[in-house]
Amino acid sequence: MTDLLITPEDDAFRKQIRDFAARELDPDTRAKVARGAPLSREDFLGWHLSLHAVGWVAPSWPTEHGGPGWTARQRMIADEEFFRQHCPPMPGFGLKMIGPILIRFGSADQQARFLPRILSGEDWWCQGFSEPGAGSDLASLRTRATRIDGGWIVSGSKTWTTYAQYANWIFCLVRTDPQVKKQQGISIMLIDMATPGVSRRPIRLMDGTEEVNEIFLDDVFVPDALVVGEVNMGWTYAKALLEHERLGIGGVGRSKHLLERVRGMARAAGLDDDHETRSRLAALEIDIIAVEATTLRLLAAAEAGRPLGAETSLLKIRGTEIQQALTELALDIAGQSALPAAESGCLEPPFENVAYQFLNWRKLSIYGGSNEIQRSILAAQVLGL
Amino acid sequence: MTDLLITPEDDAFRKQIRDFAARELDPDTRAKVARGAPLSREDFLGWHLSLHAVGWVAPSWPTEHGGPGWTARQRMIADEEFFRQHCPPMPGFGLKMIGPILIRFGSADQQARFLPRILSGEDWWCQGFSEPGAGSDLASLRTRATRIDGGWIVSGSKTWTTYAQYANWIFCLVRTDPQVKKQQGISIMLIDMATPGVSRRPIRLMDGTEEVNEIFLDDVFVPDALVVGEVNMGWTYAKALLEHERLGIGGVGRSKHLLERVRGMARAAGLDDDHETRSRLAALEIDIIAVEATTLRLLAAAEAGRPLGAETSLLKIRGTEIQQALTELALDIAGQSALPAAESGCLEPPFENVAYQFLNWRKLSIYGGSNEIQRSILAAQVLGL
Amino acid sequence: MTMQIRFEMPSDEALLLKDMAERFVADHYSLAQRSRMLAAPATELPAHWPRMADLGWLGAALPEACGGLGLSPQQVLPLIEVLGAGLVLEPVTPATLQCATVIARLLPEDRASDVLAPILAGQQIEVLVAGPDGMEPAVSARPVPGGWELSGTVRLVPGGAAAAAFWVAVDIDGAAVLRVPAAEAEVTAYRLLDGQAAASVCFDGVLCPPDACWTGARAALDAGAEMALFGALAETSGLVAALLRATLDHVKLREQFGRPIGRFQTVQHRLADMYICREEVRSMVQLAAEAMAGEASDKRRRLLSAAKVKTGDCARAVVRDAIQFHGGMGMTDELAVGHMVKRLLVLGQAGGTRAGHLTAFSAAS
Amino acid sequence: MTMQIRFEMPSDEALLLKDMAERFVADHYSLAQRSRMLAAPATELPAHWPRMADLGWLGAALPEACGGLGLSPQQVLPLIEVLGAGLVLEPVTPATLQCATVIARLLPEDRASDVLAPILAGQQIEVLVAGPDGMEPAVSARPVPGGWELSGTVRLVPGGAAAAAFWVAVDIDGAAVLRVPAAEAEVTAYRLLDGQAAASVCFDGVLCPPDACWTGARAALDAGAEMALFGALAETSGLVAALLRATLDHVKLREQFGRPIGRFQTVQHRLADMYICREEVRSMVQLAAEAMAGEASDKRRRLLSAAKVKTGDCARAVVRDAIQFHGGMGMTDELAVGHMVKRLLVLGQAGGTRAGHLTAFSAAS
């Protein structure tokens, strides 16, 4: 797979990342990532602690809050190289979502209380944005907070909450003013999962995993100190969050990782000289290069002072289309080898997670604003339609 | 190319068609059709007269008006076999449009006056539906008729009028009542192209041809006798017309004809063993079989008494997608051989009309209700969305 | 033989079978009922096998002389579509469309009737062990005193988990079939990702007497392979229609941004494309059925290959958008959508690969 | 050499060239003006060639030592995009990016300067006769007393109609190039479907003296071929952007069913796809430019192949929807759309086929 980030400085930085991963990553975890298997809490946490030990766990945070001070270009190289070394892709709920929100909008107390525990791995955060029946339409939120003395009483439910089973904290979008228009009157609240009234129901997905959950909030008390920034400003904060790490949205590292896995499958299936398989692999590699080149071009423009706008939606669309196409190609290459059930014990490498990944990654075009929503964003905000 | 219509009766009928075409079709015309070249008035008319001589020129007309009495299945076989024998695809403005409208809605006088002259080829009709700025939205018509004694004064303009340069009559949609809602208040009028006030401007297309025209109507007098059926019922009649010949809309004969031509190009270019070319040809042949099978299935249902509805829009969509894909494949096969200008004298068979056809057939997904409109029709009328 | 493709309407008998099947699925195959069935060991005879026998489904496509209903593929199609859409776990296609067809074609009539009797009675399952082209090179037979000694292991034998016997395709001076009681082979049973029971079967050292061996089996195996492919296509057709139905219901009800998502033009147009897929699948599968009933083998196979390619492409497109427009809900185990998708992934691998069929089709152009 | 892909912003000089080009196109290349130019014989020096020389465009990518501006591909890119979008008829890419590059690379510096002088002064056009891979097997050279005798005919030589001389790639113990004055060859001039002038050139019996022959030309021909491909990609990039712009303007103004068609969600989403195509084309062409400036030849070629494949696919998709959403108007000769489409059809064939580049890319994986 072609790398584009290879100036001499890039190479030196990349080597540093590679050596670290080779030295520190747990071999079992590495093997799971290499074959695309679901990961456990321990897989994630082990790697989190290794990164934390050298101050690399939060690449995008400012140094004063514990970030490593990497440039955007370095962050891209690290992301790519961590994928190449089969490191677990870290769930972003703490590191990429509520962390940056607290850094930008949180009180000094909130920052002092939560940020170090995100870095250390003591707290595992999950996200309470989606609600049953709402999907990409976040503004039509129904979880409601009622003012009482010293805080709020929150009731409602959240869904598609990834890894809530591992989490001890959840950040939620909550309606704090029912009178105003949809996007207004929403706040972000930080809720300890152990608070009375918080309960969880795992959702079993068609891929057989239970990585997502429904979260029920029944008269949960949230003190004022755990409301982020100003009341009723949650939508603004959430949007700022959605804009965070925008350039990473193309998932180039993830795509390259999967491409190499699929190429390995083609070899294992004796299809490495098959014309159609080769053509599909080559076309997808070119697609990945196009997303990477676009990312770098937008990065260069951003560094030259041109603000990034909604055009990054194109990275989300193309990145997820490529990743889904790769899971389909993997299905075709694996053929019957992908068919036994996960629990059958009859799945053999390198095909054992092909069907799981095809099924699981259908989510890529649904979550984080469906690809239809992303196209509407491009049309409205970039093309003025 | 696989034929599906081959019961023993089918075969006998097909042979009759084939023998006739082999005997009667002018060799120059045949050669032009075989290489996809634009056709002259004489090409069309010569073949029209041959068909008329044996009573086959209007396959869908009832026998009492001069049709041959063929079944729908026979009409499909004839259409396919005429294409295979490189017969000119007859423009349908007289035979498939105004003819059937007059048969269904015209006065006895109109029928007696016009139908025989359509059959004999004495009259060449063109169609005045589209207007500048209106496209697929026929209901937003601006050509207007004002009542005077004994008839109407018509003013406005029509566009995309195919082969108006050959025509002596035009049938037009005209607004006869400006007060009522869009689809109402429209009439169909028959206008002699020699009437004072009728003028024509050819439209040069990017393929270099001038097969379409703009028609200007400046205070043109149309006597009452030349209004079809009832005044203000034109939209209803036009819609009935659009439903006419619905099963032929998939253009299976046309697609098969082009597929065979493209296959010949692949041989001429030495690509008949090229893996990608073979795959694309095979996939397109399968696509054609699917359209043909769907046509036959709908035909069988219609013959069993189930009325045909909007589902035939799928035949239009898929048929035109296939034909356009074939023109793209032809471009890829021809490569540089397709590039000299038509007037350069440097184009060589079998590639001399490849670019022309690619450009010209972009119209297939635009006219007759664009493919976007067809999808909306399916969604609304078949799926209830 | 001349082809008689007429797309005739289903007969009353076919419609009756279909109606019964719809009622059966409604009564016995809710997701909860199905999920309880999945908890049973894969080696058990699936719960409704005897009932399906009573209803005449197991012999629907078999000659009357062998105890079947003697229905043509066209007439069996509506039944199989309903069973496919209903996600039934009984191995109707591998046991009755494929294996029983081979038995009926290969054995003398009276012997075939005897052998088929317990199958058609719903007492047991017997399945074929053969590759997609009707031949499985993984099992070989060596002549020994007293018959044949087999060796080889075959993975992913559909319906093999609960089978009482295997009919094993081998090469003995050409295509031959041996019947091996399941007890004599080493059977590893498991489920596929769609819940269907399958097995890996090891035949090493199995001895097979001469009276359980039938040579000259090429035509019978071909017929079985075609019926197996046809069955998979018919089930796919039912599932594609069911996915369209489910997605249509969903987008009419589900609201986002203040209105049903089915009011958005993009959703409308892509549902129109799903509809086109369903119609084309229906046409191609019906065409395959008609060709099987009346067409010479080269053209029949060519149309089956065409049906396989088109059906597979359409099914994949429908899978994509069915999940997409169900949103997160479509990814859960709680709706039928995900189960249908998994079934379609498995059916997509039945009867050979897309590339293989496209090449076969192309070679015959 | 290590690659230095940084996607740097265009320099002031590059932006100045681009601005001048935009003004030039606005002033001199309306459709009416262009159509008058098309009426001139293809064999005439195109009208604006001298002016383009004055503006420095003809030597933009050539070394300063040869009389050029010495700009890198990145810095020439904006200029070529504008000329591409402007549908200029002067053969900038074949004459200056391709042929002049070969001359500058192949000849000793002072000789190259002499030879290039009349070209850079806008007095004449000289073009290369070579295949997409830099080598054209159609012309062969046979040693004869007093030099070489050529034979062979080459069709579709871009810019060949008005050329004063041809630089002909032949095989003389490896790649060599011979300079043949146009008067000595048999030139059949014509226009391509996009209006560009080209020629079929017959070299049978042409004698070429030894001092008009340069051997060891592999590297120079490769560089020329890469520049030719790059030029076609850059023009394509400009045209794709222009088609998006034109379509966007159209759908905002054009009303159907009572509102601008740009208000329909299907149109919006497909324009978003056109936008994505434009952005990806821009990225790939810029990437190709950066790779050409600083990357080792195998990787450079690989990225050029990638750019060719992606750019071609995107251009075709944009062509489809640009015409579709312009409706009938998009098919006429009266709007720029159709002319752009025809130019893209021709550019799509430049520098090798999609299949060839995909295979080359894949082989180097």
Image: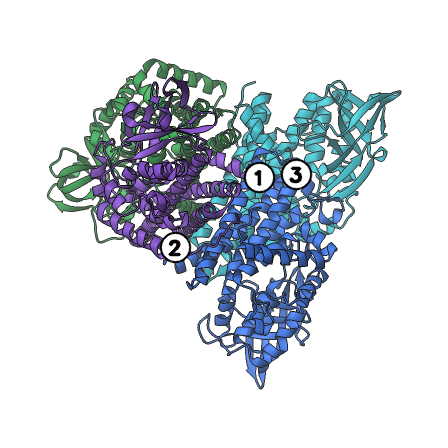
Chain colours: A green, B blue, C purple, D cyan
Question: Which residue position is annotated with label 1?
Answer: D237
Q: Quadrant of residue D67?
A: top right
Residue A306 versus residue A347 in the image, above or below: below
Question: Which residue position is annotated with label 3?
Answer: B267
On-image quarter of the C terminus of chain B = bottom left
Disc assigned to residue B191: none
Nearest the viewer among D221 and A302 is D221
Is residue A223 among the parts visible in the rendering?
yes
User: Are labels 1 and 3 assigned to the same chain?
Assistant: no
Which residue is at the far front? C110
Query: Three-letter amino acid code at disc 3?
Result: Arg
Query: Three-letter amino acid code at disc 2?
Result: Pro
Is residue D58 among the parts visible in the rendering?
no
Q: CA distance from mark 3 to mark 2?
A: 43 Å
Residue A161 versus residue D194 in the image, above or below: above
Subunit under mark 2 = C
Subunit under mark 1 = D
User: Are labels 3 and 2 assigned to the same chain?
Assistant: no
Mark in the foreground, 3 or 2: 2
Query: Three-letter amino acid code at disc 1?
Result: Ser
Q: Quadrant of residue C127?
A: top left
Q: CA distance from mark 1 to mark 2?
A: 56 Å
Taking A332 as reference, is A169 left or right? left
User: Are labels 1 and 2 assigned to the same chain?
Assistant: no
Q: Are marks 1 and 3 in contact (CB under 8 Å)?
A: no
Question: Which residue position is annotated with label 2?
Answer: C10
Percent across and percent down for residue A335 are: 41, 31
Percent across and percent down for residue A242 are: 34, 38
Dot 3: within a 10 Å radius of its alpha carbon, few (fewer than 14), some, or many (20 or more) residues? some
Percent across and percent down for residue B161 are: 62, 64
